[in-house]
Amino acid sequence: MARDAGSVARSEAAPRPLLSVPDGIVLLCGMVIGAGIFKLPSMVAGNTSGPVTFLLAWLLGGAACLCGALIYAELASRYPETGGEYAFLSRGLGRGVAFLFAWSRITVIQTGAIAAVAFVFGDYASEILPLGANSSTLYAAAAVVALTALNFVGTLQSKSLQKLLQVVLFAALVYIGVAGLVSGAAPKALAADAGAGSFGVAMIFVMFTFGGWNEAAYLAGEVHDARRNMIRILVWGIALLTALYLLVNLGYLTALGQGGMRESKVVAADLMRLVAGEKASIVLALIVCVASLTTMNAATFTGARTTWALGRDFALFARLGHWRDAGSTPANALLLQGVITLALVAAGSVTPDGFGAMVAYTAPVFWTFFLLTAITLFVFRARVAEAPAFRVPLYPLIPLAFCAMCAYMLWSALSYVSNPEYGPKFGDMVLGGLVVMLAGIPLYFLARGGRT
Protein backbone atom coordinates (compact mmCIF):
# COMPACT_ATOMS: atom_id res chain seq x y z
CA MET A 1 0.00 0.00 0.00
CA ALA A 2 1.03 3.62 -0.51
CA ARG A 3 1.43 4.35 3.17
CA ASP A 4 3.92 1.54 3.79
CA ALA A 5 6.83 3.82 2.92
CA GLY A 6 5.34 6.48 5.12
CA SER A 7 4.93 4.13 8.07
CA VAL A 8 8.63 3.37 7.88
CA ALA A 9 9.41 7.09 7.93
CA ARG A 10 7.12 7.65 10.89
CA SER A 11 8.65 4.77 12.83
CA GLU A 12 12.07 6.38 12.44
CA ALA A 13 11.05 9.92 13.34
CA ALA A 14 7.97 12.11 13.26
CA PRO A 15 7.00 15.72 14.00
CA ARG A 16 6.98 16.62 17.68
CA PRO A 17 4.58 19.14 19.29
CA LEU A 18 7.18 21.82 19.98
CA LEU A 19 5.05 24.88 19.19
CA SER A 20 2.87 26.82 21.65
CA VAL A 21 -0.03 29.14 20.80
CA PRO A 22 2.25 32.24 20.87
CA ASP A 23 4.71 30.41 18.61
CA GLY A 24 1.93 29.69 16.11
CA ILE A 25 0.67 33.29 16.19
CA VAL A 26 4.20 34.59 15.58
CA LEU A 27 4.68 32.26 12.63
CA LEU A 28 1.25 33.18 11.19
CA CYS A 29 1.96 36.90 11.47
CA GLY A 30 5.41 36.42 9.97
CA MET A 31 3.84 34.63 7.01
CA VAL A 32 1.36 37.45 6.40
CA ILE A 33 3.25 40.67 7.15
CA GLY A 34 5.58 41.38 4.30
CA ALA A 35 6.32 44.08 1.79
CA GLY A 36 2.63 44.48 0.92
CA ILE A 37 1.79 46.78 3.82
CA PHE A 38 4.61 49.10 2.67
CA LYS A 39 3.59 49.13 -1.01
CA LEU A 40 -0.09 48.36 -1.56
CA PRO A 41 -2.06 50.87 0.63
CA SER A 42 -1.54 53.55 -2.03
CA MET A 43 -3.18 51.26 -4.62
CA VAL A 44 -6.09 50.62 -2.25
CA ALA A 45 -6.43 54.38 -1.76
CA GLY A 46 -6.47 54.84 -5.52
CA ASN A 47 -9.49 52.55 -5.83
CA THR A 48 -11.64 53.80 -2.94
CA SER A 49 -13.80 56.91 -2.78
CA GLY A 50 -12.80 58.25 0.62
CA PRO A 51 -11.15 57.52 3.97
CA VAL A 52 -14.17 55.61 5.33
CA THR A 53 -14.30 53.33 2.30
CA PHE A 54 -10.52 52.94 2.41
CA LEU A 55 -10.57 51.74 6.03
CA LEU A 56 -13.65 49.62 5.37
CA ALA A 57 -11.70 47.71 2.73
CA TRP A 58 -9.11 46.70 5.33
CA LEU A 59 -11.81 45.69 7.82
CA LEU A 60 -13.51 43.57 5.17
CA GLY A 61 -10.18 41.97 4.34
CA GLY A 62 -9.73 40.98 7.96
CA ALA A 63 -13.32 39.69 8.13
CA ALA A 64 -12.84 37.58 4.98
CA CYS A 65 -9.67 36.08 6.41
CA LEU A 66 -11.46 35.40 9.68
CA CYS A 67 -14.13 33.43 7.78
CA GLY A 68 -11.36 31.43 6.17
CA ALA A 69 -9.65 30.97 9.53
CA LEU A 70 -12.84 29.52 11.04
CA ILE A 71 -13.04 27.02 8.18
CA TYR A 72 -9.40 26.07 8.57
CA ALA A 73 -9.81 25.79 12.34
CA GLU A 74 -12.54 23.17 11.90
CA LEU A 75 -10.52 21.34 9.28
CA ALA A 76 -7.43 21.36 11.52
CA SER A 77 -9.43 20.22 14.55
CA ARG A 78 -10.76 17.29 12.50
CA TYR A 79 -7.33 16.33 11.15
CA PRO A 80 -4.53 17.91 13.20
CA GLU A 81 -1.74 16.63 10.98
CA THR A 82 1.36 18.25 9.54
CA GLY A 83 0.55 18.80 5.86
CA GLY A 84 -2.33 21.30 6.03
CA GLU A 85 -4.38 21.49 2.83
CA TYR A 86 -2.74 18.30 1.57
CA ALA A 87 -4.29 16.32 4.43
CA PHE A 88 -7.68 18.04 4.03
CA LEU A 89 -7.85 17.52 0.26
CA SER A 90 -6.69 13.92 0.51
CA ARG A 91 -9.45 13.00 2.97
CA GLY A 92 -12.12 15.18 1.38
CA LEU A 93 -11.60 15.08 -2.40
CA GLY A 94 -9.27 12.15 -2.85
CA ARG A 95 -5.61 11.33 -3.22
CA GLY A 96 -5.46 12.57 -6.81
CA VAL A 97 -6.51 16.13 -5.92
CA ALA A 98 -4.20 16.10 -2.89
CA PHE A 99 -1.30 14.93 -5.05
CA LEU A 100 -1.97 17.67 -7.60
CA PHE A 101 -2.01 20.24 -4.80
CA ALA A 102 1.25 18.97 -3.31
CA TRP A 103 2.89 19.00 -6.73
CA SER A 104 1.63 22.53 -7.38
CA ARG A 105 2.77 23.71 -3.97
CA ILE A 106 6.25 22.34 -4.55
CA THR A 107 6.63 23.76 -8.05
CA VAL A 108 4.38 26.86 -8.11
CA ILE A 109 2.59 28.06 -4.99
CA GLN A 110 5.04 28.00 -2.12
CA THR A 111 8.29 28.20 -4.02
CA GLY A 112 6.91 31.01 -6.19
CA ALA A 113 5.76 32.93 -3.12
CA ILE A 114 9.16 32.58 -1.46
CA ALA A 115 10.86 33.72 -4.68
CA ALA A 116 8.52 36.74 -4.95
CA VAL A 117 9.35 37.94 -1.45
CA ALA A 118 13.02 37.21 -2.06
CA PHE A 119 12.94 39.74 -4.91
CA VAL A 120 11.42 42.34 -2.58
CA PHE A 121 14.23 41.67 -0.11
CA GLY A 122 16.77 41.97 -2.93
CA ASP A 123 15.36 45.29 -4.15
CA TYR A 124 15.49 46.92 -0.73
CA ALA A 125 18.81 45.38 0.31
CA SER A 126 20.25 46.85 -2.88
CA GLU A 127 19.15 50.30 -1.71
CA ILE A 128 21.38 49.85 1.32
CA LEU A 129 24.38 48.16 -0.32
CA PRO A 130 24.17 47.63 -4.10
CA LEU A 131 26.08 44.67 -5.56
CA GLY A 132 26.04 45.66 -9.21
CA ALA A 133 23.69 45.06 -12.12
CA ASN A 134 22.32 41.79 -10.68
CA SER A 135 22.24 42.99 -7.09
CA SER A 136 18.58 42.17 -6.44
CA THR A 137 18.90 38.64 -7.80
CA LEU A 138 22.08 37.97 -5.82
CA TYR A 139 20.47 39.12 -2.58
CA ALA A 140 17.34 37.09 -3.34
CA ALA A 141 19.32 33.92 -3.97
CA ALA A 142 21.48 34.45 -0.87
CA ALA A 143 18.36 34.85 1.31
CA VAL A 144 16.86 31.63 -0.05
CA VAL A 145 20.05 29.69 0.64
CA ALA A 146 20.52 31.12 4.13
CA LEU A 147 16.96 30.54 5.32
CA THR A 148 16.82 27.04 3.85
CA ALA A 149 20.02 26.21 5.73
CA LEU A 150 18.64 27.67 8.96
CA ASN A 151 15.45 25.61 8.74
CA PHE A 152 17.51 22.53 7.91
CA VAL A 153 19.38 22.96 11.19
CA GLY A 154 16.19 22.72 13.22
CA THR A 155 12.69 23.84 14.16
CA LEU A 156 13.72 25.51 17.41
CA GLN A 157 16.45 27.56 15.71
CA SER A 158 14.16 28.85 12.94
CA LYS A 159 11.41 29.56 15.49
CA SER A 160 13.78 31.69 17.57
CA LEU A 161 14.84 33.76 14.56
CA GLN A 162 11.19 34.24 13.63
CA LYS A 163 10.38 35.60 17.10
CA LEU A 164 13.30 38.03 16.99
CA LEU A 165 12.49 39.32 13.51
CA GLN A 166 8.79 39.59 14.31
CA VAL A 167 9.40 41.74 17.40
CA VAL A 168 11.50 44.13 15.29
CA LEU A 169 8.86 44.25 12.56
CA PHE A 170 5.94 44.80 14.94
CA ALA A 171 7.81 47.63 16.62
CA ALA A 172 8.58 49.23 13.25
CA LEU A 173 4.98 49.04 12.04
CA VAL A 174 3.64 50.45 15.31
CA TYR A 175 6.16 53.28 15.00
CA ILE A 176 5.02 54.07 11.44
CA GLY A 177 1.37 54.12 12.51
CA VAL A 178 1.89 56.24 15.63
CA ALA A 179 4.34 58.58 13.87
CA GLY A 180 1.75 59.25 11.19
CA LEU A 181 -0.99 59.90 13.75
CA VAL A 182 1.11 62.46 15.67
CA SER A 183 3.03 63.93 12.71
CA GLY A 184 1.02 67.15 12.58
CA ALA A 185 1.36 67.16 8.79
CA ALA A 186 -1.25 68.73 6.53
CA PRO A 187 -2.85 65.76 4.74
CA LYS A 188 -3.72 66.17 1.09
CA ALA A 189 -7.43 65.79 0.38
CA LEU A 190 -8.85 64.07 -2.66
CA ALA A 191 -9.23 66.27 -5.71
CA ALA A 192 -12.81 67.16 -6.57
CA ASP A 193 -12.57 65.32 -9.87
CA ALA A 194 -10.81 62.26 -8.46
CA GLY A 195 -12.42 59.00 -9.60
CA ALA A 196 -13.56 56.39 -7.11
CA GLY A 197 -11.74 53.58 -8.90
CA SER A 198 -12.90 50.01 -8.38
CA PHE A 199 -13.62 48.70 -4.90
CA GLY A 200 -13.17 45.17 -6.24
CA VAL A 201 -9.64 46.02 -7.38
CA ALA A 202 -8.97 47.58 -3.97
CA MET A 203 -9.97 44.29 -2.32
CA ILE A 204 -7.56 42.36 -4.53
CA PHE A 205 -4.70 44.42 -3.12
CA VAL A 206 -6.06 44.13 0.42
CA MET A 207 -6.33 40.35 0.20
CA PHE A 208 -2.83 40.15 -1.24
CA THR A 209 -1.55 42.06 1.79
CA PHE A 210 -3.39 39.63 4.10
CA GLY A 211 -2.17 36.60 2.14
CA GLY A 212 -0.52 33.75 4.00
CA TRP A 213 -2.68 33.31 7.13
CA ASN A 214 -3.67 29.81 5.99
CA GLU A 215 -0.06 28.67 6.40
CA ALA A 216 -0.72 28.14 10.11
CA ALA A 217 -2.69 24.99 9.19
CA TYR A 218 0.63 23.35 8.29
CA LEU A 219 1.73 23.58 11.89
CA ALA A 220 -1.12 21.48 13.30
CA GLY A 221 1.05 18.39 13.73
CA GLU A 222 3.62 20.38 15.73
CA VAL A 223 1.33 22.45 18.00
CA HIS A 224 0.54 21.46 21.58
CA ASP A 225 -3.09 20.23 21.83
CA ALA A 226 -3.72 21.18 18.19
CA ARG A 227 -7.44 20.37 18.23
CA ARG A 228 -8.05 23.24 20.64
CA ASN A 229 -5.10 25.55 20.04
CA MET A 230 -5.31 25.90 16.24
CA ILE A 231 -8.50 28.02 16.54
CA ARG A 232 -6.71 30.31 18.99
CA ILE A 233 -3.72 30.67 16.68
CA LEU A 234 -5.84 31.47 13.62
CA VAL A 235 -8.40 33.82 15.19
CA TRP A 236 -6.06 35.73 17.48
CA GLY A 237 -3.42 35.96 14.78
CA ILE A 238 -5.83 37.50 12.26
CA ALA A 239 -7.31 39.84 14.87
CA LEU A 240 -3.80 41.08 15.68
CA LEU A 241 -2.99 41.52 11.99
CA THR A 242 -6.19 43.47 11.30
CA ALA A 243 -5.58 45.82 14.23
CA LEU A 244 -1.97 46.41 13.14
CA TYR A 245 -2.95 47.09 9.53
CA LEU A 246 -5.65 49.54 10.63
CA LEU A 247 -3.14 51.40 12.81
CA VAL A 248 -0.59 51.69 9.99
CA ASN A 249 -3.21 52.81 7.45
CA LEU A 250 -4.63 55.36 9.87
CA GLY A 251 -1.09 56.72 10.15
CA TYR A 252 -0.80 56.95 6.37
CA LEU A 253 -4.16 58.72 6.09
CA THR A 254 -3.44 61.19 8.91
CA ALA A 255 -0.02 62.21 7.60
CA LEU A 256 -0.52 62.07 3.82
CA GLY A 257 -4.28 62.15 3.28
CA GLN A 258 -5.94 59.96 0.71
CA GLY A 259 -4.94 62.33 -2.06
CA GLY A 260 -1.28 62.09 -1.04
CA MET A 261 -1.52 58.31 -0.76
CA ARG A 262 -2.94 58.03 -4.27
CA GLU A 263 -0.03 60.00 -5.70
CA SER A 264 2.61 58.10 -3.74
CA LYS A 265 4.56 55.19 -5.22
CA VAL A 266 6.27 54.46 -1.90
CA VAL A 267 3.73 55.46 0.72
CA ALA A 268 5.71 54.28 3.74
CA ALA A 269 8.86 56.04 2.54
CA ASP A 270 6.94 59.28 2.02
CA LEU A 271 5.57 59.08 5.55
CA MET A 272 9.03 58.42 6.97
CA ARG A 273 10.44 61.42 5.11
CA LEU A 274 7.78 63.60 6.75
CA VAL A 275 8.56 62.46 10.26
CA ALA A 276 12.31 61.72 10.10
CA GLY A 277 13.80 63.34 7.01
CA GLU A 278 15.34 62.04 3.79
CA LYS A 279 17.78 59.69 5.50
CA ALA A 280 14.81 57.76 6.80
CA SER A 281 14.66 55.95 3.46
CA ILE A 282 17.54 53.76 4.64
CA VAL A 283 15.63 52.96 7.82
CA LEU A 284 12.61 52.04 5.73
CA ALA A 285 14.74 49.78 3.53
CA LEU A 286 15.91 47.96 6.65
CA ILE A 287 12.30 47.58 7.85
CA VAL A 288 11.19 46.11 4.52
CA CYS A 289 14.17 43.75 4.55
CA VAL A 290 13.11 42.51 7.99
CA ALA A 291 9.52 42.12 6.79
CA SER A 292 10.67 40.12 3.78
CA LEU A 293 12.91 37.86 5.84
CA THR A 294 10.17 37.07 8.35
CA THR A 295 7.81 36.13 5.52
CA MET A 296 10.42 34.01 3.76
CA ASN A 297 11.42 32.23 6.96
CA ALA A 298 7.83 31.33 7.85
CA ALA A 299 7.10 30.21 4.27
CA THR A 300 10.24 28.09 4.20
CA PHE A 301 9.29 26.54 7.55
CA THR A 302 5.74 25.59 6.52
CA GLY A 303 6.29 24.91 2.81
CA ALA A 304 8.39 21.79 3.15
CA ARG A 305 5.75 20.16 5.39
CA THR A 306 3.47 19.44 2.40
CA THR A 307 6.36 17.95 0.45
CA TRP A 308 7.16 15.75 3.44
CA ALA A 309 3.52 14.58 3.61
CA LEU A 310 3.63 13.72 -0.11
CA GLY A 311 6.74 11.63 0.46
CA ARG A 312 4.97 9.59 3.13
CA ASP A 313 2.15 8.64 0.76
CA PHE A 314 3.85 7.91 -2.58
CA ALA A 315 6.81 5.58 -3.03
CA LEU A 316 8.01 7.62 -6.03
CA PHE A 317 8.76 10.47 -3.59
CA ALA A 318 9.66 8.35 -0.57
CA ARG A 319 12.93 10.16 0.03
CA LEU A 320 11.01 13.38 0.60
CA GLY A 321 9.12 11.70 3.46
CA HIS A 322 12.23 11.43 5.60
CA TRP A 323 12.02 13.40 8.87
CA ARG A 324 15.38 14.40 10.31
CA ASP A 325 15.12 13.72 14.03
CA ALA A 326 18.11 15.92 14.84
CA GLY A 327 16.49 19.35 14.77
CA SER A 328 13.05 17.88 13.95
CA THR A 329 12.92 18.98 10.28
CA PRO A 330 11.81 17.52 6.92
CA ALA A 331 15.37 17.72 5.64
CA ASN A 332 15.07 16.38 2.09
CA ALA A 333 11.86 18.31 1.46
CA LEU A 334 13.57 21.52 2.57
CA LEU A 335 16.48 20.95 0.21
CA LEU A 336 14.21 20.30 -2.80
CA GLN A 337 12.15 23.38 -1.96
CA GLY A 338 15.29 25.49 -1.85
CA VAL A 339 16.53 24.23 -5.23
CA ILE A 340 13.19 24.92 -6.98
CA THR A 341 12.96 28.37 -5.39
CA LEU A 342 16.44 29.23 -6.66
CA ALA A 343 15.39 28.13 -10.16
CA LEU A 344 12.36 30.46 -9.98
CA VAL A 345 14.57 33.32 -8.80
CA ALA A 346 16.72 32.72 -11.86
CA ALA A 347 13.63 32.70 -14.11
CA GLY A 348 12.26 35.88 -12.53
CA SER A 349 15.58 37.67 -12.96
CA VAL A 350 15.11 37.78 -16.76
CA THR A 351 11.64 39.40 -16.58
CA PRO A 352 10.91 43.16 -16.26
CA ASP A 353 9.91 42.70 -12.61
CA GLY A 354 10.76 39.53 -10.71
CA PHE A 355 8.17 40.17 -7.99
CA GLY A 356 5.35 40.79 -10.47
CA ALA A 357 6.35 37.72 -12.48
CA MET A 358 6.11 35.48 -9.42
CA VAL A 359 2.70 36.91 -8.45
CA ALA A 360 1.41 36.16 -11.95
CA TYR A 361 2.94 32.67 -11.84
CA THR A 362 1.37 31.67 -8.53
CA ALA A 363 -1.98 33.46 -8.18
CA PRO A 364 -4.35 31.36 -10.36
CA VAL A 365 -3.01 28.09 -8.97
CA PHE A 366 -3.15 29.35 -5.39
CA TRP A 367 -6.80 30.43 -5.54
CA THR A 368 -7.82 27.21 -7.32
CA PHE A 369 -6.72 25.10 -4.37
CA PHE A 370 -7.91 27.61 -1.78
CA LEU A 371 -11.42 27.17 -3.21
CA LEU A 372 -11.13 23.38 -3.30
CA THR A 373 -9.94 23.28 0.31
CA ALA A 374 -12.97 25.29 1.45
CA ILE A 375 -15.23 22.86 -0.42
CA THR A 376 -13.82 19.95 1.61
CA LEU A 377 -15.61 21.32 4.68
CA PHE A 378 -18.96 20.65 3.01
CA VAL A 379 -17.77 17.13 2.19
CA PHE A 380 -16.78 16.42 5.79
CA ARG A 381 -20.03 17.84 7.18
CA ALA A 382 -22.03 15.59 4.83
CA ARG A 383 -20.35 12.49 6.18
CA VAL A 384 -21.32 10.79 9.40
CA ALA A 385 -18.25 11.30 11.55
CA GLU A 386 -17.13 12.24 15.03
CA ALA A 387 -17.83 15.90 15.84
CA PRO A 388 -14.61 17.93 15.95
CA ALA A 389 -13.50 20.05 18.88
CA PHE A 390 -14.43 23.17 16.91
CA ARG A 391 -17.22 23.74 14.38
CA VAL A 392 -17.67 26.79 12.12
CA PRO A 393 -20.54 28.96 13.43
CA LEU A 394 -23.38 30.06 11.14
CA TYR A 395 -22.82 27.09 8.86
CA PRO A 396 -23.23 27.11 5.84
CA LEU A 397 -23.27 30.92 5.47
CA ILE A 398 -19.66 31.55 6.46
CA PRO A 399 -18.21 28.77 4.25
CA LEU A 400 -20.37 29.85 1.29
CA ALA A 401 -19.24 33.46 1.65
CA PHE A 402 -15.62 32.36 1.75
CA CYS A 403 -16.05 30.14 -1.32
CA ALA A 404 -17.58 33.08 -3.20
CA MET A 405 -14.57 35.23 -2.29
CA CYS A 406 -12.18 32.51 -3.49
CA ALA A 407 -14.05 32.20 -6.80
CA TYR A 408 -13.87 35.96 -7.31
CA MET A 409 -10.15 36.04 -6.57
CA LEU A 410 -9.57 33.15 -8.98
CA TRP A 411 -11.42 35.02 -11.73
CA SER A 412 -9.37 38.14 -10.99
CA ALA A 413 -6.13 36.15 -11.16
CA LEU A 414 -7.05 34.61 -14.52
CA SER A 415 -7.97 38.04 -15.91
CA TYR A 416 -4.33 39.02 -15.30
CA VAL A 417 -3.57 37.71 -18.80
CA SER A 418 -5.94 40.16 -20.50
CA ASN A 419 -5.01 43.13 -18.30
CA PRO A 420 -3.52 45.78 -20.64
CA GLU A 421 -0.97 46.84 -18.02
CA TYR A 422 0.28 43.44 -16.86
CA GLY A 423 -0.74 40.97 -19.58
CA PRO A 424 1.99 41.80 -22.11
CA LYS A 425 4.69 41.48 -19.43
CA PHE A 426 3.47 38.54 -17.36
CA GLY A 427 0.78 36.71 -19.34
CA ASP A 428 3.26 33.92 -20.10
CA MET A 429 3.94 33.51 -16.37
CA VAL A 430 0.21 33.00 -15.67
CA LEU A 431 -0.01 30.33 -18.35
CA GLY A 432 3.27 28.82 -17.18
CA GLY A 433 1.95 28.31 -13.66
CA LEU A 434 -1.18 26.61 -14.98
CA VAL A 435 0.82 24.34 -17.31
CA VAL A 436 3.13 23.27 -14.48
CA MET A 437 0.09 22.55 -12.28
CA LEU A 438 -1.57 20.42 -14.97
CA ALA A 439 1.69 18.52 -15.53
CA GLY A 440 0.98 16.97 -12.15
CA ILE A 441 -1.94 14.98 -13.57
CA PRO A 442 0.10 12.46 -15.61
CA LEU A 443 2.72 12.46 -12.86
CA TYR A 444 0.03 11.33 -10.40
CA PHE A 445 -0.83 8.30 -12.51
CA LEU A 446 2.85 7.45 -12.74
CA ALA A 447 3.29 7.82 -8.97
CA ARG A 448 0.13 5.81 -8.28
CA GLY A 449 1.36 3.02 -10.52
CA GLY A 450 4.63 2.98 -8.59
CA ARG A 451 3.09 2.58 -5.13
CA THR A 452 4.47 -0.10 -2.81
Image (tube, grey):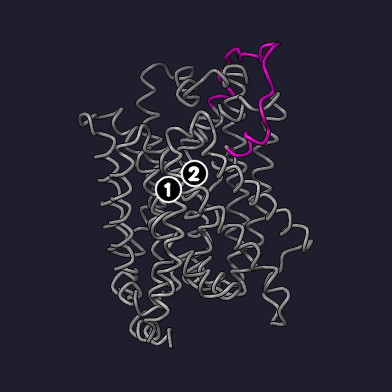
Is residue 219 placed above or below 421 in the rendered structure? below
Q: Is residue 350 left or right of residue 253?
A: left
Classified by dominant secondary structure, the portion drawn in magenta counts as loop
Residue on which the image places disc 2: 33
Residue 367 place in picture, x, y as percent: 56, 52
Q: Quadrant of residue 337?
A: bottom left
Disc 1/disc 2 C-alpha distance (Å):
7 Å
Residue 347 place in picture, x, y as percent: 31, 44
Q: What element carries label 2?
A: loop
Q: Is residue 131 left or right of residue 408?
A: left
Is residue 57 placed above or below 45 in the rendered structure? below
Which of 375/223 is in front?
375
Which of 308/288 is in front?
308
Category of crowding for the residue at label 1, using alpha-carbon neighbours closer than 10 angstroms: few (below 14), some (14–19), many (at least 20): many
Quadrant for the C terminus in the image: bottom left
Q: In this view, does 446 lie to the left or right of 262?
A: left
Which residues lie in the magenta part?
179-204
Residue 271 is inside the magenta segment: no
Q: In which quarter of the image is residue 89?
A: bottom right
Q: Which mark is residue 400?
A: none
Residue on which the image places disc 1: 295
The residue at 28%/56% (across/down) is 339
Residue type, mark 2 in image: Ile
Residue type, mark 1 in image: Thr
Residue 30 place in picture, x, y as percent: 46, 49
